[in-house]
Amino acid sequence: MPVDAAQLWTLNHRLLTVVLDACSAELAELGLEAKEFFVLAEVAASPYPAELAARLVIPKASVTVYVRNLVAKGFMRREIDDTDLRRHRLVLTDDGVAARDRAFAALARAFDRRLAAIAPQDRAELQRILLALLEPAPEATS
Amino acid sequence: MSDVPLPSGPWTEHELAQLDDSELIRVAAARADGTLRPLVTVGHVRLGQDELIRSLHGTSGAWYRAAVASGRGEIEIGGLRVAVAFLPDHGREADVDQALRSRYGDDAGVRRMTRSPARDATLRVVPLRTGV
C-alpha cells in the first residue's frame, strides 16, 4: 500500500507535538517555554543568534527575545567572541546546562512512555529509519 | 467553543500602544476546565484595530488547538494581562503575511510564518470585557 508523504509528515509532527505537550508543565516548572528550550538545546552547537535563528527556522526577532529571556533567567550569558571581538557568542551557564538536561530528561521520559507501546525490535527499526531520513535529501528534479 | 456571544470590546488606546511596543507577546490558551495552559511567546501583527497571531506549527500546534477549542485565554503585553477570545481568522492571509514581513523582516523564520502550515493557523485576538 503506498504511503502518502504528507500524511507521514503530519503523523511525525503530531507525535513530536504530543510529546512536547506532555512535557509543557515540567518545562514550565523549569522556567522554560518550548521554544526557549529549543534555543537552550541548540546554543552549544550554534552559539550566535543568527545561527540559532537559521538552525531553528524561527524569526531572528524571536530569537532575540528568547535569548534576552534566557539571559535574564540566568540560563545563558553573552561573551565576547575571541575570534571576532565585534560580536558576542552565547554560552550556557551552569544553571542553563542543568535546565537543558532536566528538560531533555523530561522529554525522554514522555517519549519513552510512547515508545513502550512498540516492541524493542521496532524501536531499533525506528532508529534506523530516522537516521536514514536525516541523511542529506537528493536534489529535487522539478 | 460556546455559541454564547462574547463580552468583547475594542482594544483601548493604552493596550494598542502596548501591543505596538511589544516585539512579541505571551499567550496562554484556556483548557477545557478553564485553567490556563503555560504562556507561550509568539509574534503578532495589527491590521487596523485587529490583533492577529499565528501558530508556527500550524493547526496541529498544541497552544493553537487549545486556543481554538476553548476560544478563550489571556495574553501578556508589557506586564499587562488581558483576558481575550481567540477567533480563527481567514481571508486576509496575504495582508497578515505582509504585516509580518514589515514587522519582523524576511528571514527564514519569517518565511516559515508566512507559509503553510503557520499561514493556516491565524487567530484574531479580541479583548474580553467584564460588564460590557
Image: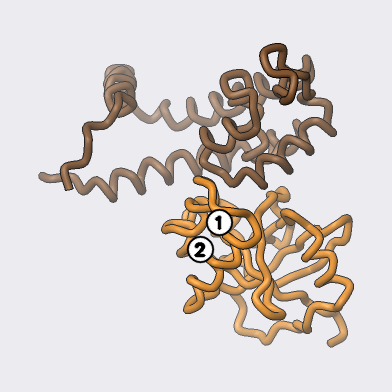
| Dots 2, 1 in contact, CB < 8 A | yes
Q: Is residue A16 left or right of residue B43?
A: left
Image: B124 above or below A77 = below
- Chain A, colour shown: brown
At a point 21% along the width and 48% down the height, the residue shown is A4
Bin the neighbour count of mark 1 within 10 Å (Cα to Cα): few under 14, some 14-19, many 20 and up.
Answer: many
Type of the residue with mark 2: Ala
| Residue B38 x %, y % | 71, 48
Q: Is residue A46 left or right of residue A89?
A: left
Q: Position of residue B21 (x, y in %)?
A: 81, 61
The amino acid beneath tag 1 is: Ser
In the picture, the quarter occupied by the N terminus of chain B is: bottom right
In the rendered image, which quarter is residue A37 located in? top right
Residue matched to label 1: B55
Asked if badge 2 and badge 1 are on a common chain, one would say: yes
Which chain is mark 2 on?
Answer: B
Q: Is residue A16 above or below residue B1?
A: above
Q: Nearer the viewer, residue B75 or A116?
A: B75
Residue to which mark 2 is pinned: B121
At x 69%, y 35%, the residue is A27
Image coordinates for residue A9, horizontal then vertical, percent: 33, 44
Closest to the observer, A57 or A48: A48
Dot 2: element: loop
Question: Residue A83 is drawn in which quadrant?
Answer: top right
The quarter of the rendered structure image containing the C terminus of chain B is bottom right
Question: Is label 1 in a helix, a strand or a loop?
Answer: loop
Residue reaching furthest to the left: A1
Pointer 1 chain: B
Q: Which chain is orange?
A: B
On screen, residue A126 versus residue B77, left or right, reads: left
